[in-house]
Image: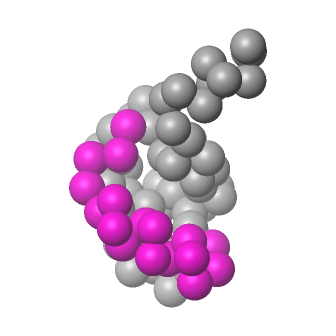
Amino acid sequence: MRNIVNETGEIIAKATHDGTLVGGHHRIAVAASLGQMLLWQDSGEPVNLETFFRHPASSQRRMA
């Protein structure tokens, strides 16, 4: 498990090592809407939010 933290180090969400969001869906959405920078706690790298909020059908629509 990996933790997603905000700029102050507060744990916002949890994800698996392959990037699947396990908990904190609402908290991550609120933090993103407030413009908070979200980071992986173990590496300090910024979290790519598109990975979590992209609709599965959106990739199919782009290909059409």
Does the stretch in magenta take in 46? Answer: no
Please tell me whether residue 16 is drawn above or below residue 6 in the rendered image.
above
Locate residue 46, reporting x and y percent: 65, 58
Locate residue 51, reporting x and y percent: 56, 41
Closer to us: 29 or 17:
29
Q: Quadrant of the N terminus?
A: top left
Image point (51%, 48%), residue name: 53
Please tell me whether residue 62 is drawn above or below residue 50 in the rendered image.
above
Residue farthest along the left direction in this orientation:
23
Please tell me whether residue 40 is drawn above or below residue 50 in the rendered image.
below
In the image: residue 35, left or right of residue 17: right
Does the stretch in magenta take in 27? Answer: yes
Closer to us: 27 or 9:
27
Closer to us: 3 or 49:
49
In the image: residue 19, left or right of residue 26: right
| Residue 43 visible in rendering | no
Q: Which residues are magenta?
A: 20-37
Image point (34%, 68%), residue name: 26
Residue farthest along the top direction in this orientation:
64
In the image: residue 61, left or right of residue 41: right
| Residue 14 visible in rendering | yes
Q: Looking at the rendering, which quadrant does residue 14 occupy?
A: bottom left
In the image: residue 1, left or right of residue 31: left
